[in-house]
Image (cartoon, grey):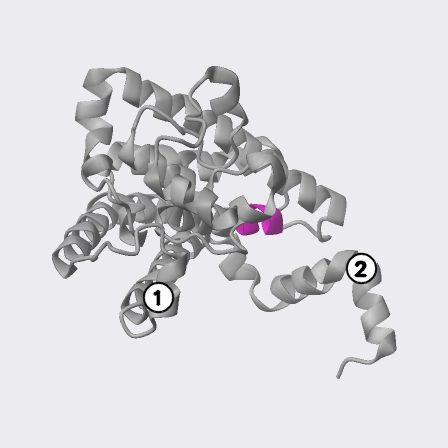
Amino acid sequence: MLDSTNIKYILSNWGGMVLIWDYLRTNHKEMLRSPLFPIVVSVSTYFITCLFYTTLDGLSKLVPALNRYRIHPDQSIKPSGILKAVMLTLYNHLVFVFPASVAQWYWRPSLPLEERAPTALEFTLGILGCILLFDFQYYLWHLAHHRSQWLYVTFHAIHHEYSKPFCWVTQYMSAWELASVGFWTTVDPVFLHCHHLTSTVFMVFNVWISVDAHSGYDFPWSLQNLIPFGLWGGSVKHDAHHRCPTTHFQPYFSHWDWLCGTNSGHFKSSAIARKRKRDA
């Protein structure tokens, strides 16, 4: 039971991260050390998040008020489109992700776990560092695969079969793109010497943000509406990218698009124009 003493202990121990990490190390040590753990977390987070938005899509037909938050309220998401995207996702996971997971489990030793939890500063800087690094890596990858006709046709064009994305389009991609994204998500926290807890939270955050960017929803509490100065891309700008694939290449922030001249100035997408009209 929480009392004033326990609450003070939680606050004094880096927002409860000490308690969380001690609990995980004590009760789930072998699971955390398993090479399969990051893969299970990533895949399960993806399907749970997609199922959440799929539920919203279904409810929008029964609760019209939800349509005010849809970027394309007149868009009807067809079951055949969902099935096509889900089937490719399952194919990529069964043919590529699963064998790689088994190989990793077989050859890679169990990971050592840190004794102490990350401090609040370490945790925050670790998450921010991973976001900025991944943002830069994927911006260059994404830009290159749009500038090169061969790269685009061979590896990336499949992702743009849907001009108005919905949640399951997130991983409707080639195996090469899925491998690239998975590689950076896994390696970046290691490169930045992040704590195991920080790495796991970043992985969950990365999957959630990716699905949210393709969800087709623009909620008042979405990050693009909370982070000021248009610094965050989010679903609205990524919708603009799918409709006009010469702009908005960053997955998270917008600074590289601004600096490199690939920001559309918010006029390429009718969804953005409608958002501005709502906000006016």
Percent of width and height locating residue 208 = 45, 52
Label ID, residue 56: 1
Q: Which residues are magenta?
A: 196-201
Name the foreground residue: 147 vs 112.
147
Name the foreground residue: 32 vs 59.
59
- Which residue is pictured at 35% across the width and 31% down the height? 268
User: In the rendered structure, does residue 194 fall within the stretch colored magenta?
Assistant: no
Q: Is residue 270 left or right of residue 195?
A: left
- Amino acid type at image mark 1: Leu
Disc 2 is placed on an element classified as loop
- Which residue is pictured at 64% across the width and 45% down the height? 195
Name the foreground residue: 246 vs 127.
246
Comparing marks 2 and 1, which lies closer to the viewer? 1
* Separation of residues labelled 2 and 1 (CA atoms): 37 Å
Asked if 109 appears above or below 11 in the picture, the reply is above
Percent of width and height locating residue 51 = 33, 64
Category of crowding for the residue at label 1, using alpha-carbon neighbours closer than 10 angstroms: few (below 14), some (14–19), many (at least 20):
some
Percent of width and height locating residue 156 = 24, 30
- Which residue is pictured at 69% across the width and 63% down the height? 22
Label ID, residue 13: 2
Picture quadrant of residue 69: bottom left
Q: Main secondary structure of the magenta part?
A: helix
Label ID, residue 123: none
- Amino acid type at image mark 2: Asn
The answer to the question of whether label 2 and label 1 lie on touching residues, with beta carbons closer than 8 A, is no
Picture quadrant of residue 263: top left
Percent of width and height locating residue 274 = 39, 45
Q: Is residue 166 visible?
A: yes
